Amino acid sequence: MLRLLHTADVHLGARHTDLGERAAVLRERQFAAFRTSVELAIVEKVDIFLIAGDLFDSNTQPRRSVERVAAELGRLARASIRTVIIPGTHDVYDGASIYRSYDLPGMARAASDWVVVLTPYIPEVVFPPLDAIIYGRVFDTKRSPRSPLAGLDAKSDTRATWKVGMVHGALAIPGRTDSDAVVVTEEEIAKTGLDYLALGHWHSAIEGRAGNVAYAYSGAPEPVAVDQDGAGQVLLVTLEDRGGHHVVSIEPRRVGQTRSEKLDLDVGGVHSQPELIDVVGRHADSNLVLEVRLTGLYPDDLDLDLDEIERALSPSFLRFRIHDLSIPASPEGNVAPADTVVGAFVRSIEDQMAALEAATGPTATGAAATPEPEELDDLREVLRLGRHLLEGRQVTL
């Protein structure tokens, strides 16, 4: 049996310039998630801690940040857990690479076989005590000159029983990932003969199989963007031999603090702005990114100021946004003259509605014709929205 903890896309040191004063908070959350991942590996007594690229958000980091990472890697080594790291597309192994500038094993006070950084010049590492080999296919440029899996034939490699690969790149999706810096196909994965391929680059967790090869993206352990879905976890991976067959099981474990939720609120049941603030405020959580969407029919007597609502509720959440997707009620008052744009629009829609309603009358055969009710509903909504828009009221569609 071989047990792994698979993580990637930690993005330590990300600037988060769009978050203003809260940027430092998210940076600390990202480091906390990394530290929690280390603690989980120690508690679960895994054999190898895999970091599949973009441990750092860039190659320019203060020494103190690198020292904090090295201290965590040292904890793993003292717990008899090996760490294998590959550079990604943010901490690419170019001439200015952070992995060239700093000696991570030395800073972690660990022997070189306890903390290993795979590079174009060290493409794999064999761990005889674990009967395992880890292949890392990386380049010294951000954009790969070829597939990182080209020529990888783990099946014929007799140096170890367990074969694990690491790649930081996109799974090929025609029309979507063609321009990515590093791309691999499922066909290439299937040909490798690996037991497991640990992927990085996508920040949402995904699992799959290509032939006999299990592969997965662990996703970012803490969302890199506060509204990111599918992030916040690491993967515990177990490789077992069952009657001569290699079986891979993958168990997601949550390590991140940030959560994202969307709340649809029927504005028809809201009587005032303070009431809305009170209702939403009950969800207050400093770890929550909340998006509220107002739906339903907007009452004529309700007066909401979305900017004021955001200012009132933002301190209660990691981030708060509110959007008005409601339908305005029919405006009251006299219809504009027929020779105006508004008047012509209203009369045109009302004529169409009248024609549909008249179709319910008796036909020549005495039977009643029934118009499609959806058509009338659609026209009513067109009339409500159109009048509000033409009369100058802002409506979010």
Image (cartoon, helix red, strand yellow):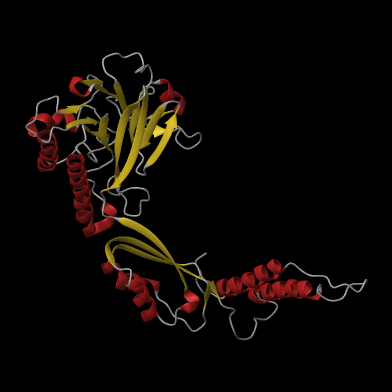
Left/right placement of residue 281 relative to residue 116 reads: right
Q: Position of residue 164 (x, y in %)?
A: 30, 26
Q: Position of residue 73 (x, y in %)?
A: 14, 36
Seen at 20% across and 47% down, the residue is 36
Q: Position of residue 95 (x, y in %)?
A: 21, 26
Residue at the right extreme? 365
Q: Nearer the viewer, residue 346 or 261?
A: 261
Residue at the bottom extreme? 333
Residue 346 visible in this rendered orientation of the protein = yes
Location of residue 270 (image quadrant): bottom left
290 relative to 54, above or below: below
Residue 145 visible in this rendered orientation of the protein = no
196 relative to 36, above or below: above
Question: For the N terminus, which image quadrant?
Answer: top left
Left/right placement of residue 101 relative to residue 122 reads: left
Left/right placement of residue 172 relative to residue 234 reads: right
Location of residue 369 (image quadrant): bottom right
Q: Nearer the viewer, residue 255 or 360?
A: 255
Q: Position of residue 139 (x, y in %)?
A: 29, 24
Seen at 24% across and 27% down, the residue is 94
Residue at the front extreme? 243
Residue at the left extreme? 109
Seen at 25% across and 23% down, the residue is 132
Left/right placement of residue 383 relative to residue 89 reads: right
24 relative to 323, above or below: above
Count of numbered badges drawn on the protein = 0
